[in-house]
Amino acid sequence: MDIFSLWGEFYNDPWFWQFPMATLAISMVAFLTVALPWTIVAWIDPASLRKYKIQQKPFEVKKYFLPSIGRILINNLIVAAFLVLTWPLLKLTGVHNNELPAWYVIVAQLVFFVLLDDFLYYWMHRYMHENKWLLRHVHSVHHRVRNTCGINGNYMHWLEFSLTAMVTLIGPILVGAHIYVIWLWVIIRQIEGADGHIGYDIPWNPVHFLPVYEGPVYHDFHHAKFKGNYAGFLPYLDKYMGKTYIPAYLRYLKAKRDGLIAEEIAQRETFEKQSSKVVR
Ligand SMILES: [Zn+2]
Ligand SMILES: [Zn+2]
């Protein structure tokens, strides 16, 4: 079979467009829908919102905007190629577009996807920090930006992007999910991926309504401190299993419970650092 007739077989198969291709397109659009408005906010850096900036220093929007857009396009193209190559296997999975399951089954599946994805992502991400080769040649790309804005969420090496996409699809393939549930899941996953990088801890951020998500501060501390806070959605792995919770993040949470906002917490941290130097 030559390459053109092989392509024709894909092209004329509506399930190929509905399952891998539409899922990839929805995932990219969901990411950009959250990431772009927050990137514009970070670019403008309005004075009224500066008190909510998690890191009280300038964003690196201009330097990394075009590289982020470039990487996002290339990474999505590579995943598209990967999906084409694996299509003969993907179409054998139980993923379907028949009748939708009951709402409670959908909820249970989404909870399962979050738990599984977060568990696998935690260990993959942590390994990318512990393995010197992966850190230097792959994961370091994502860590070039220390004070991130939304669009930097998908600024990463193509291998990391492909592995992350693969991890996201494992849950739905295991349960043989309905395609609409997969679309909902990738939207939730990309909201997390974008929101984790917005750089602001704003009380009225609508994403706080997502019950399973820790919020943007969690991953922001990962970029600021580089070690620790490896999970995406939930902090339990860093907190209990890996003991990789960042101490400054714990202090941040405590200060927030005391009623402080990002700017005051940063000031308190600087003040305490300086006073501990004086005491020494
Ligand atoms: Zn990292
Ligand atoms: Zn990140």
Image (cartoon, rainbow, N blue to C red):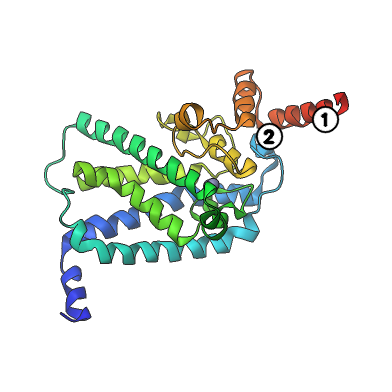
Query: Furthest-right residue in view?
Result: 278
Residue 109 percent coordinates (x, y): 25, 35
Taking depth in this image into account, of 115 and 150 the one nearest to the observer is 115
Residue 115 percent coordinates (x, y): 35, 34
Identify the secondary structure beneath mark 1: helix
Residue 172 percent coordinates (x, y): 25, 44
Taking depth in this image into account, of 279 and 151 the one nearest to the observer is 279
Q: Residue at x 41, y 46 (%)?
A: 190
Residue neighbourhood size for the residue with mark 2, other residues' Cα within 10 Å, grouped as few (<14), some (14–19), many (≥20): some
Residue 99 percent coordinates (x, y): 12, 42
Q: Disc count in the image?
A: 2
Residue neighbourhood size for the residue with mark 1, other residues' Cα within 10 Å, grouped as few (<14), some (14–19), many (≥20): few
Label 1 beta carbon within 8 A of ligand 1: no
Identify the secondary structure beneath mark 2: helix
Q: Amino acid at mark 2?
A: Lys
Name the image quarter holding the N terminus.
bottom left
Q: Which residue in the structure is indicated by mark 1?
A: 274
Mark nearest the camera among 2 and 1 is 1
Q: Residue at x 27, y 66 (%)?
A: 85
Distance from Cα at disc 2 to Cα at disc 1:
21 Å
Quarter occupied by residue 270: top right
Q: Residue at x 61, y 55 (%)?
A: 144
Name the image quarter holding the C terminus.
top right
Q: Amino acid at mark 1?
A: Gln
Which is nearer the N-term, disc 2 or disc 1? 2
Q: Which residue in the structure is indicated by mark 2?
A: 51
The answer to whether marks 2 and 1 mark residues whose Cβ atoms lie closer than 8 Å is no
